[in-house]
Each structure stands twice: as C-alpha cells, then as structure tokens.
Image: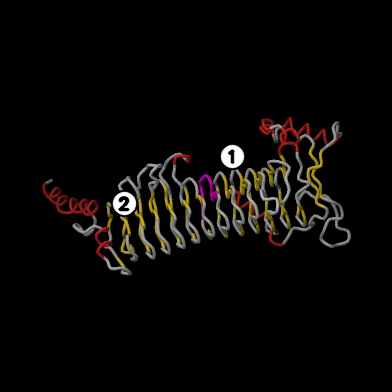
Amino acid sequence: MAPILALLRRWLVPLILFVLAGPAGAVSLQEMLDQAEEGATVRPPAGIYLEHVVIKKPVVLDGSAGVIIDGGNSGTVMEIATSNAEVKNLILRNSGRLHNALDSGLRIKGDFNIVKDVKIENSLFGLDMHEADNNVIRRVSITSKPLNLELRGDSIRLWYSHFNRLEDNIVHDARDFVVWYSHDNTITGNTIHNGRYGIHFMYAHHNHVFGNEIADCVVGVFLMYSNDIDVRHNRLLRSWGASGMGVGFKESSGVTIANNDIVGNAVGIFLDISPYDPDATNQFESNRIAYNGMGVEFHTDWEGNIFTGNAFLSNFTQVAVRGGGTALRESWKGNHWDDYAGFDRDGDGLGDSPYEIYNYADRLWMEVKDAAFFRASFALEALDFVERLAPFTEPRLLLREDKPLVHLPDFAKDAPKSALELLQ
C-alpha cells in the first residue's frame, strides 16, 4: 500500500497542480501576453490555464501546442480589447452564467482581428462582438451551457458591428445567432443546428447570408426591420413547432431570397407586412420550397413580393393568407407547382391555363386562428372534400399564376430524393 501512495504523491499531486496553476507555474498566460512585444507570436506550452485573459495589444496567440483556457464558470473567458490581433488553435471553456453581464467564451471589442480554429465550449454566450468592425471569424465551434433553450445565451452576437466575415463556423445547442444594428456583414458556409433563431437580423441592413446550413432550429432566418439582405444558396431545414419557419419577415424590404432549399419546415416562408417600404420589393427566385406544412404564409393581404422560378413541391398547403385576404396582389411568374393539373400543348414549357388556388373549407383555419388546431383533421378534410365536390358556398380565389412552369426546373430535378434525405 505504501508504494502505491508514494507513487500517487509523486505523479498525481504534480499533475493536479499543473492543471490548476497552468503549465508555466509562476507565469500566467496573461503575463505572457502582457510581456510580448506588439506583433509578436505567443505560443504557450500545452496545458489548462485557469484564468481570464484580456488581449490588449496586437499580438498572435497560437495555442496549437494544446492550450485550454478555462474561465472557471465565472465571467468572460477571453476578451480581445485591441485591433489587429489574432487568436487561433485553442479551446475556451466554462464562462459564467450571468445574462446581464453577457458572460461569454470570447468577446471582441476591436477591429481587424482574426479568430480561427477555436473551440468555445460550455459558455453561456459564445462569441460577443461589441462595436467591432472588419473582423474575421473562421472555423470556430460554439456550444452554450446545457440549459433549457430559452436560458442559453446566444451563440454569436453582433452589436453595432460592421463589415465582419463569419465563415465556416459550427454552431449547435445554443440559443440565437443575432445580428443587431449591424450592417455589411458576410455570413457564409456556417453550420447552425439545434437553436432557436438560426440567424436573427434586427435593424441590420445590407448583410449577406450565403451557403449556410441551418437545421432543427425554431426559425431558420428571421428578418425584423432589416432591409437589403441577400440570402442565397442556403439550406433551411426542419424548423417545426408552433412558430417554426424557414424564413420569416417582419416589416423588411429590398430582400433577395434566391437558390435556397427551404425544406421540411412548419412554414417555408412567412411574411408580415413586408415589404414595409412602399417603393421596395422582396425577390424570391429559384428556391426549392418543399415538404413544408405551408409553403408560403402571408400574415395579411399584401403586395410587393415577387416570386419567380421557384419550385413548390409537396407542401401540405402551397400558399396561405391569414385574415380573409388573398395573394392576388403579389407577383407570381414562372413558378413550378407540383399540383398543377394543366397542359402545355404548344410545348413552350408554360402552362396553357392558369394555376389557381381556391379556398374552400381552408378558409376556416385561415380566418379563425383557433381553428388552425384542426387543420388536416379528418373532420376538416371531409368538409373540404364535400365543399369541392358540391360547393354550398362560393370558394375564394386565393392565388392565380397565368403562365406556370410545367416542367421541374433544373435546380430542383433531384428534389424528391434530396428532399426526403434532408427530412431524415
């Protein structure tokens, strides 16, 4: 027994001290950074550094030796309070839990910084960018604390931060990715899963969202009072629940939604008083809108939205309008509807007769909010069938497209296979 205890004292106690005190013993990571010259590269030895770090000068912090910075479940783990710094190849973990303090894995309060190949774990807020411009965030992995969804912090938070690039990051099991009062940011190639808002824009104009996958969130992309946003080549998948939607609009104008897969959501596209600017339009071009509960839902009868060349495939309801309105004032041109029953006798690729949607019993749940609970129920479906067979009230024309696209567009020809794969 004595030899075993001696062995434990010899090896285990030094290891515990190494983990708690950091690999350099007397020299903390903060001291290394403070002592470095501007422009220098700091390469700390491998180990767990139990401290909070503030980078105050333009240096490169390279943790590729195996550096973990542990905040000890209090405060913000690291802050970049300078410009032209670089942080790479390390792990930040265990921030505090205070929402009012925005306890984060990493906070940036400077310009022209680079953060890449960093993992942020068990941190309430992942990345907090506060009045920080022209930064590059690349290949950063972010998770929040294991709390209920509404109690987690935001994965990425931009506050009055402009001209930033957020590229190829992996975000999961956090709350929201929010862009507030921030313009001209590029968000591209990111994977965002299991959150609330995949990306939420608030008073944030001229931003660009390209090539992201947003899946299993409550909402994919939401635009609130945000104009001139470009959303292209994204996959917006499986947003379910009472508020589930792939793309949502609230009083937003000049937006382009193009070449996206909007698949398997409760609502594919939701529009509330958008466009808000009477001189602007919103463009929806070449999107695959498939396997949604509702392909497009308008909160009210509106105008200024232009739908061109989209593929509407196997949505339970292709288009819905709340409050007794119609979508006749919107622009529909060259869209493919998989339930179109017309012909193309002249072979020009366009239907010889209009594509039309009439409301029969569907008017009940579109006009009476509480009746939506019975949508797709046997009773309502039976009533709808009888209405269509022998109408005892005049149906309402909801939508008309004069020249629908008969054949499936090239971008959607793999739709049945790929859509089913995306739903798995």
Along the line of sight, the residue nearer the viewer: 170 or 188: 188
* Residue 351, image quadrant: bottom right
Residue 168 on image: x %, y %: 49, 60
Q: Which residue is mark 1?
A: 241
Residue at image position (81%, 61%) is 349
In screen coordinates, is 117 left or right of 9? right
Q: Residue 275's x, y, as percent?
A: 67, 50
Q: Quadrant of residue 361?
A: top right
What coloring was used for the rendering? secondary structure
- Report which residue position mark 2 lands on: 70
Rendered residue at 54%/49% (across/down):
200
Residue furthest right as drawn = 345
Q: Is residue 390 above or below residue 152?
A: above
Name the main secondary structure of what is drawn in magenta.
Answer: strand
Residue 192 covered by magenta stretch: yes
**Which of the two labelled residues, at mark 2 and mark 1, occupies the earlier sequence position?**
2
Q: Is residue 338 left or right of residue 165?
A: right
Label annotation for residue 13: none
The total of numbered circles placed on residues is 2
Q: What's the CA distance linking mark 2 and mark 1?
A: 36 Å
| Residue type, mark 1 in image | Gly
Q: Label 2: state its secondary structure.
A: strand
Asked whether, in this view, residue 84 is left or right of residue 203, the answer is: left
Q: Which span is picked out in magenta?
A: 191-202
The percent position of residue 347, horizontal first and vertical second, equals 85, 62
* Disc 2 residue type (three-letter): Asp
Q: Badge 1 local density, few (<14 within 10 Å), some, or many (20+)?
A: few
